[in-house]
Amino acid sequence: MRIDYLKHGFGYKHKNLILKLVVITFFFGLAFKLVFFHSLPQKFVPLLEHTFPEKTTIVPEHQNTLVSEHVPENEDQSTNTEKCDYLSGDWVPNPKGPLYSENCNHIEPYQNCLKNGRPDREFLYWKWTPRKCDLPSFDPYKFLNAMRNKTWALIGDSITRNHVKSLMCMLSTVGQSVVVYEEKGFKSKTWHFSSFNFTLSVIWSPFLVEAGIVEDINGVPNSEIELHLDKLSSKWKNQFMNFDYIILSCGKWFLRSAIYYENDTILGCHSCPKSNLKELEFTFAYRKAIKFVLNYIVSSHHKGMIFYRTFTPDHFENGEWSNGGTCNRTKPVKEGEMEIKYLNKMLRDIELMEVENAVIEASRNGVNLKVVDFVPLSLLRPDGHPGPYREFHPFDKKDKNGNVQNDCLHWCLPGPIDSWNDILMEMVVNNR
């Protein structure tokens, strides 16, 4: 009995002692490891991180992004795959100035402000700069090279002609073109750059729908325009499918006196006080015409790229075109300093509503339709219009009342409208 007790007592104590030694050894080893490894240079410390899969947290859907808890040092942490908002920005000083000069032979006389005697030149030295991304200046060679074997058409009114002349002046700094088509009155025209097999057309169609217009020698309608709201203008419809890139726009021609037709039946008239026709607001025709044009585009199966450009705001102050309005400013304004006129806002709101709906439907049908809204940047440039310098040395030939006609709708060339091409190039060539 005594022996059995001693054996059992010794075995119990012995096992207890061994357990204590194991625990002490474990903690001593752990303490040694921590002290030893922290004392070594960093390059000898084993890399123990990332033994588990990297954790990714999904943020709320409206933020539309993924936030990773770890970004490898060799990756660009600033990479942003979202499309740039080119229309949120500011006009900043640009010492380089424009790409071309007033000597470009594509500039129409009434837009060549410098040759017509405009004394200030500061309006030439500004560049539109988005706030959250870069916008490179238009590169004419890169554009032409990317557009080899392609055809472009700009379709619309005199602002469209203004725009195409800006684009032609830029392209002509690196490439030679020849005129292959010219309509009487210079309103529609086509150029071909043989070195790149690139064709650029401007098509005069101020309503985009069919319009019967009788004009006087100055191009002013001398009777009510007959506007068919359910018929496309054949000037562009017959060529539509032949163009790879198209920019369409319309605007203030809808303010003119016009008789509105649908199914060859008179619906009414806008601003026809001498007629017995039903008076209709111009917004009625504007919405109907734009919707009809867009419906055609949406269902066209066109395989190129189509832009609808919103109309450009004017900057008449102290009146309008017909009653002494002027635009004498010499610098851009800041956002919020100048509000868009109520009339201009109505036109733009109609356009944006109709086009945004059409873009969704076009995408479903495989048609590449985009809206390009230059209003935000154009609104800030009241200094960019010809004003009185739509004519050569205007103050040498005042009317009998000492007045000079101002143009505060079209743009000087060179001028702010050149920035439109910067944006278009990024959207088309660089797909941004």
Image: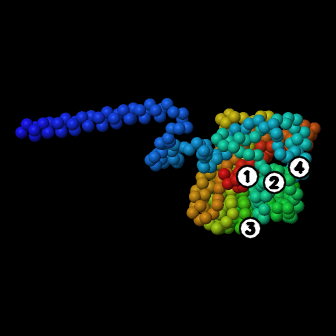
Mark 1 → mark 4, Cα distance in angstroms: 21 Å
Q: Closest to the observer: 129 or 263?
A: 129
Which secondary structure lies at badge 1? helix
Looking at the image, which residue sits at the far front? 3
Mark 4 closeness class: few <14, some 14–19, many ≥20 residues within 10 Å:
some
| Residue type, label 2 | Tyr
Which secondary structure lies at badge 3? helix
Mark 2 closeness class: few <14, some 14–19, many ≥20 residues within 10 Å:
some
Q: Do tag 3 and tag 4 residues touch (Cβ < 8 Å)?
A: no
Residue 113 in sight: yes
**Sequence-wise, which precedes: disc 3 or disc 1?**
3
Q: Do tag 1 and tag 2 residues touch (Cβ < 8 Å)?
A: no
Q: Is residue 123 above or below residue 54?
A: above
**Sequence-wise, which precedes: disc 3 or disc 4?**
4
Which secondary structure lies at badge 4? loop
| Residue type, label 1 | Met
Q: Do tag 2 and tag 4 residues touch (Cβ < 8 Å)?
A: no
Q: Which colour assignment does the render follow?
A: rainbow
Q: Which residue is mark 1?
A: 425
Q: Is residue 343 above or below residue 213?
A: above
Answer with left or right where residue 86 lies relative to residue 196.
left
Q: Which residue is mark 3?
A: 242
**Relative image position of residue 201 (x, y in whole percent):** 80, 60
Q: Do tag 3 and tag 2 residues touch (Cβ < 8 Å)?
A: no
Which is in the foreground here, disc 3 or disc 2?
Answer: 2
Mark 3 → mark 1, Cα distance in angstroms: 21 Å
| Residue type, label 3 | Asn
Labelled disc at residue 141:
2
Find residue 383 and report its image quarter: top right
**Sequence-wise, which precedes: disc 2 or disc 4?**
4
